[in-house]
Amino acid sequence: MTVVHVLDDYYLAITLLVTIAYQLSAFAIAFTFKFDKLTDFAGGTNFIIIAVIALAFSGHHNARQIVASLFLILWAARLAGFLLFRILKTGKDDRFDDKRDKFFPFLGFFVFQMLWCWTVSLPVTLINSPNVTQFPQPDFGTGSDIAGVIFFTIGFLMEAISDIQKYRFKANSSDKGAVCDVGFFGFSRHPNYAGEILIQFSIYMICVSPAATNDVHGGARAALYASVVGALFLTVLLMFVSGLPLQERPGAKKRYESGNNWEAYKSWLDRTSMLIPFPPQLYVRMPVFIKRTLFLEFPIYVFDPEKHADKGKVQERESEEGRGEGEHQQS
């Protein structure tokens, strides 16, 4: 098949331009019609478009290119489908309540989504690019390939199953204060994030294999190694920007201040690893130092009622509970 050379031989420019055009189109529709159902779906499907373009343009369809591209497509299709299903059930996305009617804040979400899609796709983009495929490729089945396939399988199952477990728990629970500790959530507070991180590093391991075996040389070899920035970007995003920081301490704070089954929630926090799945019977006995280092439960995630709780809200809630108990006794 003919190799397509367009703009640059790493396919960086064409995939970036396609991503910008796709996300701006999604923004135009979402902003015009105040349509939340397109936001996350546009993100997931963008990965599919990048992978299809890169693979189709490459002209060299060896097993490694196909596996890496299909893994990215499979992950993105499942994620986009699940998020679309969830938003169709809920009707709207609360994240956009303060942005939906504001042009630039809402546009900012899509600009960030451009960066997310393009950066995380880099390993697949590069493994299919002419600057890499010009070199003879090692047969699929290197140690890096095998490890990547194993880790992808584990990560994909972990993310997919945990998403279903949490959705079904919320849908079937009549108690809004119930703590989701079923399935994977009994071993990790965020198994879906752990699975997603593992998936992206597994795809990178497959794509970097030709560089690791020294079959690819020069700038192409350096580019393959540098594409780890995609998995690292996703990890930083989930751990320090839009994932854990918005859920860990804020979630505990809200539970504590409202008195929403706080004791059960705190017990779950104490016995359950934040990200890395681990037996709760062992984790609960771990020294705090080990939890804060090896298990990544950094201080920025930890909720301390004395430091972080709004005392006014707590006192107001306690006084209301006291009045309610008094009225109940009188009756």
Image (cartoon, helix red, strand yellow):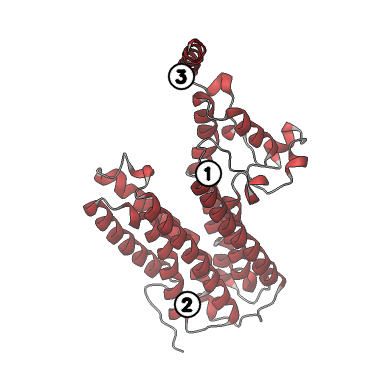
What's the distance in space between the residues labelled 3 and 2, CA to CA?
55 Å
Name the residue that disc number 1 marks: 173
**Of the image marks 3 and 2, the number of the one nearer the N terminus:** 2
Above or below, 145 against 283 in this view is below
| Residue annotated with mark 3 | 313
Residue beneath the point at 69% across and 42% down: 295
Disc 3 or disc 2, which is closer to the eye?
3
The quadrant in which residue 186 appears is top right
| Residue at 25% across, 58% down | 29
Residue 153 circle label: none
Q: Tag 1: Cα neighbours inside 10 Å, few (<14), some, or many (≥20)? A: few
Q: Is residue 9 visible?
A: no
Image location of residue 189, percent across then percent down: 61, 43
Residue bearing mark 2: 55
86 displayed left or right of 102: right
> Residue sitting at 23 percent across and 53 percent down?
33
Amino acid beneath label 1: Ser
Q: Disc 1 to disc 3, how far (Cα)? A: 27 Å
Instruction: Give the camera-side residue of 250 and 264.
Output: 264
Give yes or no for contact between labels 2 and 1 (Cβ–Cβ under 8 Å): no
Occupied quadrant, residue 217: bottom right
Mark 1 or mark 2, which is nearer the start of the sequence?
A: 2
Three-letter amino acid code at the position of disc 3: Lys
Density class for disc 2 (Cα within 10 Å; few <14, some 14-19, many ≥20) is many
